[in-house]
Image (tube, helix red, strand yellow):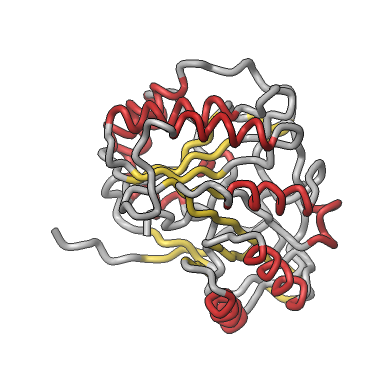
Amino acid sequence: MQTPAKRFIPVFDHSSQANGSRMPTYIRQALTEKTNYSSTASSVHNNKLVTVCEEAHCPNRNECWNRGTATFMLLGDTCTRACGFCAVKTGRPDSVDSTEPQRIAQAVAEMDLDFVVLTSVNRDELEDGGAHIFAETMQALRTDNAAIGVEFLTPDFRECQEQAIDIVQKAMSDLPFSRDDNIKLIWGHNIETVPSLYKVVRKGSQYERSLKMLSLISDMQQVETKSSIILGLGETKQEVVEVMQDLRENHVDRIALGQYLRPTKYHLPVKEYLSLELFSEYENIAKDLGFTWVKSGPMVRSSYHAED
C-alpha cells in the first residue's frame, strides 16, 4: 500500500517570540491522511487509558497516531510535581488503578503493536513511586506477546530508586530480555535540561539524582539506557555538551534532543529556537561521544520513533 504523502502545518507555540525572533518555519508537524488515527484513538479511549501524547500536548500526536503508535502514561493523569515546561496537570492523584496493566495489554493487542513505550506521572506519595505498575504492565504485555519490545520512561523515583529498580528486576526474572536478543527492554529517564536551570525547569528534581537513577539502571545487564534533553530554555552549548558527557560517563546508551515549545502561556517561555545546523552539530557530538542511538531535531521528543 502506498504511503500517503505528508503535508505540514505550523506548530502553535504560545510564545510567539524568543530573543526577538519568531518561530522558524521549519518547526512544523506532519499532517498526513488519517490512516490509523481513529483506530488508535478508539483503542486508547475505549480502554480508558491516558497517553502522554494528549496530556503533554505533544506536537507529534497526529503523526504517531496515524502510524498506529502511542505512548501510554501509567498511574493516572495527575503529577505530584510541577515542572515549568510540562503540560501534565499537577495535584493530588487518584488511587492507583490495579486494572491498568491489563487495559494497556488489551489496547496494545487491538493496535497490533510489537513495540510499546510506557511512561508515567511522578507519584512521590507512593512507597515505590509506582514501580509495581510498570512491572505488572510489562508482565501483562509479555504474557500476551512474548516477542514485544518495551521502553520504559520512568520518573527518578525520588525516595526509592533502589527499591523501584529491584521491583522491575524481579518482574523481569522470568522474562527473556537480553542485550543479545532483538527483544529488549529500553529504560529511559529524562535528564531534561542542564544543571543551572533545574530549579526553574524541574522543580522537585535534582540533576545528580537523575544521573544516579540512570547509573543504577545501567548496571542492569538486560537493558539499554536512554535519556532526553529539551533545548531552548536558556542553556549554553557548553552546558549541553557537558550534560551529554555526564550521561555517557553514567553509561547512557541512547539520547534524544529536541526543541522546547511552550505548551500554554502559563509555562516557561522559549528563550531560543535552535537552528537545524546546531541540532545536526549536537547529533554529531553525541555520536562521537559513543551514544548508540541518537535523535536530534526540532520536533524530536523522548519517545519519538522510539521503535527505530
**Image quarter in which the N terminus is found:** bottom left
Q: Quadrant of residue 249?
A: bottom right
Task: Point out residue 9 in the picture as x, y percentages from the top left corner.
Answer: 46, 63
Q: For this rendering, which residue is in front, 9 or 157? A: 157
Q: For this rendering, which residue is in front, 197 or 155? A: 155
Residue 230 appears in view: no
**Image quarter in which the C terminus is found:** bottom left
Q: Is residue 139 toward the left or the right of residue 229 in the image?
A: left
Number of numbered markers: 0
Q: Is residue 182 toward the left or the right of residue 189 in the image?
A: left
Task: Point out residue 246 in the picture as x, y percentages from the top left corner.
Answer: 70, 65
In the rendered image of this protein, does residue 159 appear above or below residue 285?
A: above
Task: Point out residue 32 in the picture as x, y percentages from the top left corner.
Answer: 33, 58
Q: Residue at 34% across / 30% down in the picture?
A: 107
Residue 120 appears in view: yes
Residue at the outermost left position: 1
Q: Quadrant of residue 275?
A: bottom right
Q: Residue at 46% across / 28% down in the picture?
A: 49
